């Protein structure tokens, strides 16, 4: 019996396989296997999920002997490969307002998106103005909670399937907690790991977000994960509060390195 070779695999099947290997392999490995793999790797269906860490750009430049390539240029390059098919995107630090506008126009099918802290710190007003272009958005990761209220308003108006929100190291006061409850009544997944949130504001979320199936408030400051908290959260299938504590702290003395954050996509 003649042995079958990977390069002889039917084209659509090969595309389906390569669509699961990840962006790093698509860029650095697959194109150099054979001509059929290279051709298949160019299919937009392989580029639906775009996520990478801070080392990939350096590896890309070294592999292709490119001396200069900005984060913006690299992001546009990989997003362009998807030809509008991208459904999941995790952006690295260093992206500009120009790139966010580009993504809004080129990725109308996004269902999950993770934005780095530096983007929101530099351009906090740009995100709410673009949310309306992602009507299929279901999950959003934010590197900070700046302008959160306006972001939530736009989500409630444009994204009728929205179910998951992650805010890295947020400061959840009464306004933010109430906005989550009022503007995201159907939210199922909420990650506030490392947040500043006291018991009162946690209680607002626990009592108001009745459809939650996953809530992560681990390593937070402002509340003790005691029996009362556990009782309030008893209706939530997955509730994480490990490492949280009631502690007095000074906002000016509490520093967080947002560069170390990575958005974990929560699938339903």
Image: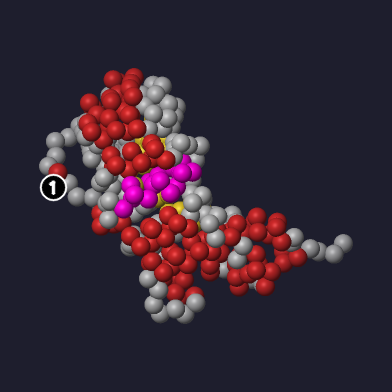
Q: Mark 1 packing: few (<14 Cα in 10 Å), some, or many (20+)? A: few
The quarter holding residue 174 reads top left
Residue at the image point whose x is 17% and y is 46% from the top:
254
For label 1, the SS is helix
- Give yes or no for residue 69 being in the magenta stretch: no
180 relative to 73 in the view: left or right: left
169 relative to 26 in the view: left or right: left
- Give how far across and how far down residue 100 sits, in percent: 38, 57
Nearest the viewer among 219 and 27 is 27
Q: Using the image, determine if residue 245 lies above or below residue 228.
A: below
- Give yes or no for residue 128 being in the magenta stretch: yes
Nearest the viewer among 220 and 148 is 148
Q: Is residue 24 visible?
A: no
- Give how far across and how far down residue 264 sits, in percent: 42, 46
- Give how far across and how far down residue 161 sits, in percent: 48, 37
Q: In which quarter of the image is the N terminus?
A: bottom right
Residue at the image point whose x is 43% and y is 49% from the top:
133
- Give how far across and how far down residue 130 sits, in percent: 37, 50
Q: Using the image, determine if residue 236 lies above or below residue 250.
A: above
Q: Can residue 94 be seen in this view?
A: yes
What segment is highlighted magenta in the picture? 126-141
Residue, disc 1: 253
């Amino acid at each position: 019996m003649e042995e079958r070779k990977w390069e002889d695999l039917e084209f659509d099947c090969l595309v389906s396989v390569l669509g699961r290997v990840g962006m790093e392999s698509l860029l650095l490995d697959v194109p150099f296997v054979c001509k059929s793999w290279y051709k298949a790797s160019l299919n937009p269906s392989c580029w639906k999920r775009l996520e990478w860490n801070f080392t990939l750009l350096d590896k890309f430049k070294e592999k292709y002997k490119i001396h200069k390539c900005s984060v913006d240029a690299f992001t546009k390059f990989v997003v362009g490969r998807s030809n509008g098919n991208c459904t999941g995107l995790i952006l690295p630090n260093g992206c500009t307002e120009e790139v966010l506008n580009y993504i809004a126009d080129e990725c109308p099918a996004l269902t999950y998106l993770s934005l780095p802290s530096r983007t929101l710190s530099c351009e906090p007003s740009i995100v709410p103005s673009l949310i309306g272009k992602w009507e299929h958005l279901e999950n959003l990761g934010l590197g900070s909670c700046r302008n959160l209220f306006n972001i939530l308003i736009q989500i409630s108006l444009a994204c009728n399937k929205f179910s998951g929100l992650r805010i890295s190291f947020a400061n959840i006061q009464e306004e933010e907690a109430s906005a989550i409850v009022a503007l995201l009544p159907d939210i199922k997944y909420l990650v506030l790991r490392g947040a500043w949130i006291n018991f009162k504001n946690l209680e607002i979320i626990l009592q108001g977000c009745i459809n939650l199936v996953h809530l992560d408030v681990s390593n937070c400051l402002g509340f003790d994960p005691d029996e009362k908290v556990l009782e309030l959260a008893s209706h939530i299938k997955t509730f994480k509060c490990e490492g949280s504590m009631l502690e007095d702290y000074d906002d000016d003395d509490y520093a967080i390195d947002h560069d170390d954050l990575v958005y974990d996509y929560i699938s339903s």
